[in-house]
Image (tube, rainbow, N blue to C red):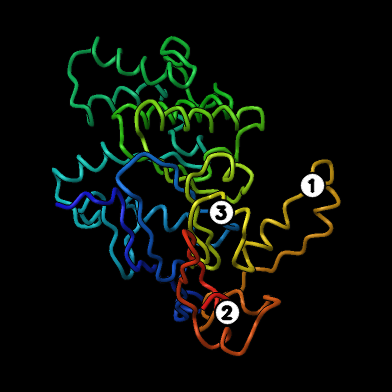
Amino acid sequence: MSEENLLQVEDVSKIYGYGFLGRVKFPAVDHVTLSMENKPKIFTIAGESGCGKTTLARMMLGMVKPTAGTILYRGKNVHNLKSKDRTWFLREVQAIFQDPFDTFNPLKRVDTYLYETASNLLKLKNDEEIRGKIEEALRFTGLSLEEITGKYPNEFSGGQIQRVSIARALLPKPRLIVADEPVSMVDASIRINILNMFKALLTKTGTSFIYITHDLATAYYISDEIAIMYRGMIVEIGPAEKVLLKRHHPYTQALVKSLPEPGKKEEWKTRVNAPGMEIKEFLSPGCKYADICPHKTERCVKEKPPLFEIGDVKVACWLYE
C-alpha cells in the first residue's frame, strides 16, 4: 500500500438528477482531482454555498459514493473497505459538521457518545482508562467530563456543543479531520478559539485537516493550501497565500473583491449582487464561470479549461494556457 499521499481524490464526479423524475442530470461535483501529502497540514476547500464542497467532503468521508472517480486514503479506496479496514478508517478519519446540534440525538446525554466512541473505536474496556481518554480530549477543548456528564444537547450553547463534537472527533487520535463549516454557526467570539484549536492540534499531534468553508477570512487565517470551487469544479488550487493574494482566476478575484471592508457590511450587502444558482451553469460544456466572466471568449463557452500550472498554483482558465 502506497502512503505517498494521505488523501488522493482522482477525477471524482457526483451526478444528481433534477427536474421531472430526475431526468436532467447535473454534476454537483465535476471531475475534481486533488491530493494531500502525508504530512500535517490544513487544506481548505472554499466557495459559495451550493458549489459542491460539502458533497465532496461527504465523499471523502465515505458517506456519499461518487458517480465516477476514486478517493484513496493512505492508498485504500474509501468506498471499497472491508469491515476491518472500515474500523481502521473511522479511527483515522473523523468529521466535524456545521450544525453541532444535528450531531447529537436531543434525547441522549452527550457524554454517552464519548464513552461509545472510546469503547467502539479505541476498543477500551477499563472504565478508568476510558474516562482518562475522554478527559484528555475534553481538556484540549476547554471542557471537563464533570461539566458535561448527564447533560443533554439543549443544555449547552452552540460553542460548547461544538467543542464536545470536536472532543469526540479527537478521541481516536485521527490523522485527518474533515471539518465542514465548523465555525459558521457559533458566535464570532468562539470562532477564533476553535480555529486556534485546530492549529494547535496540527502542531502538537500532527493531525491534518480538510477545512470546508465559504469564509475566505478564516480560510486565509488557517490554511496551508486552498482549493477554490465554483459550480462543482476546482478553478484554482495551491498555497493559500498565493491563491488568495495573487488571485489568478477571475472567480477568485471576484470572490475576494466581494469581501466587505471593515465597518461597511451594510453597504456591501446592497452592493454585491451574486449570481443565482442556475442548473444550466452546472451543465455548461465550457467554463462554468463564462457567463459572468469579464474575460469570456467563445472558447470559454464551448471548451472546459484544464488546470494550468503557474508556479505552485494551478488555475482552470484559458487566460493561462
Find disc 1 in the rendering and name its residue.
Answer: 261
Quarter of the rendering containing residue 171: top left
What SS does tag 1 mark? loop
Labels 1 and 3 touching (C-beta < 8 A): no
Please tell me whether mark 2 or mark 1 is closer to you in this view.
Answer: 1
Amino acid residing under circle 1: Glu
Which one is in front, 147 or 207?
A: 207
Please tell me whether mark 3 or mark 2 is closer to you in this view.
Answer: 3
What SS does tag 3 mark? helix
Labels 3 and 2 touching (C-beta < 8 A): no
Taking 128 as reference, is 9 left or right? right
Tell me where residue 113 appears, x and y as whole percent: 35, 27
Find disc 3 in the rendering and name its residue.
Answer: 242
Amino acid residing under circle 2: Lys
Please tell me whether mark 1 or mark 3 is closer to you in this view.
Answer: 3
Which one is in front, 309 or 44?
A: 309
Q: Earlier in the sequence, mark 1 or mark 3?
A: 3
What SS does tag 2 mark? helix
Tell me where residue 205 appears, x and y as whole percent: 35, 28
Position above or below: 270 against 178: below
The circle drawn on residue 280 is 2
Compute the Cα span from label 3 to label 2: 31 Å
Q: Earlier in the sequence, mark 3 or mark 2?
A: 3
Taking 4 as reference, is 46 left or right? right
The circle drawn on residue 43 is none
Quarter of the rendering containing residue 56: bottom left
Position above or below: 18 against 270: below
Q: Residue at x 54, y 26 (%)?
A: 154
Amino acid residing under circle 3: Lys
Position above or below: 189 against 215: above
Compute the Cα span from label 1 to label 3: 21 Å
Q: Residues within 10 Å of mark 2 (few under 14, many from 20)?
A: few
